[in-house]
Image: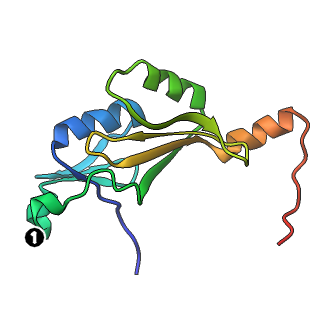
Amino acid sequence: MQLTTPLPAVADLERSFRFYRGLFEQEAVLGLGGNLSLSGGFALQQDFDRLAGIPKDSVMRRSNSTELYFETEDFDGFVARLSARKDIDYAHPPRKHPWQQRAVRIYAPDGQLIEVGESMRTIARRFHEEGRRPRRSPH
């Protein structure tokens, strides 16, 4: 078995597409009515309750139990794009994790949690420029 596509439920497909296109540079790959596959390997689904045959009020907003995770080579540029927008709802502002990766978490228009972190390649490059050496894991 293979996982093929994370599929966030959205109330307004066009609004959600503008959000993901504007911030995450996602392009539409395939549109099938209320379903829109994006270039990042996930799809947006409008009217999920009807499609899944579940009550509309059972579609949760802000469950905070899963997230879409993105990495970027230009974390500072991404944070600048966030700061320029008035419609961003932060779960937490940009911060640095103990493993030295900078990340920010925000909510999509329909409440899905999204994390954007700087790529591990960027961190490795920064460590190299600072003269740090990799350590072996004790495991």
Percent of width and height locating residue 29 = 28, 48
Which color scheme does this rendered protein use? rainbow
**Above or below — where is 138 with respect to 35?**
below
Q: Residues within 10 Å of mark 1 (few under 14, many from 20)?
A: few
Q: Nearer the viewer, residue 61 or 18?
A: 61
Q: In the rendered image, which residue does mark 1 sit on? A: 53
Q: Is residue 1 left or right of residue 135?
A: left
Q: Residue furthest top?
A: 84
**Left or right relative to 73: residue 14:** left
Residue at the spot 44% in from the left edge and 26% down from the top edge: 82
Residue at (37% x, 21% y) in the render: 85
> From the viewer's perspective, is 25 left or right of 111?
right
Q: Is residue 73 shown above or below 135?
A: above
Residue projecting furthest to the bottom: 1
Q: How many marks?
A: 1
Question: Which of these two is toward me, 58 or 73?
Answer: 58
Q: Position of residue 40 (x, y in %)?
A: 40, 49
Q: Residue at x 84, y 32 (%)?
A: 129
Q: Quadrant of the C terminus?
A: bottom right
| Vertical order, 8 against 82 (above or below) | below
Residue at x 15%, y 42% (from the top left corner): 12
The picture quadrant where one finds residue 49 is bottom left
Q: Secondary structure at mark 1?
A: loop
Q: Position of residue 119 (x, y in %)?
A: 62, 43
Quarter of image, res 41:
bottom left
Point out the image quarter for the N terminus. bottom left
The amino acid type found where label 1 is placed reads Gly
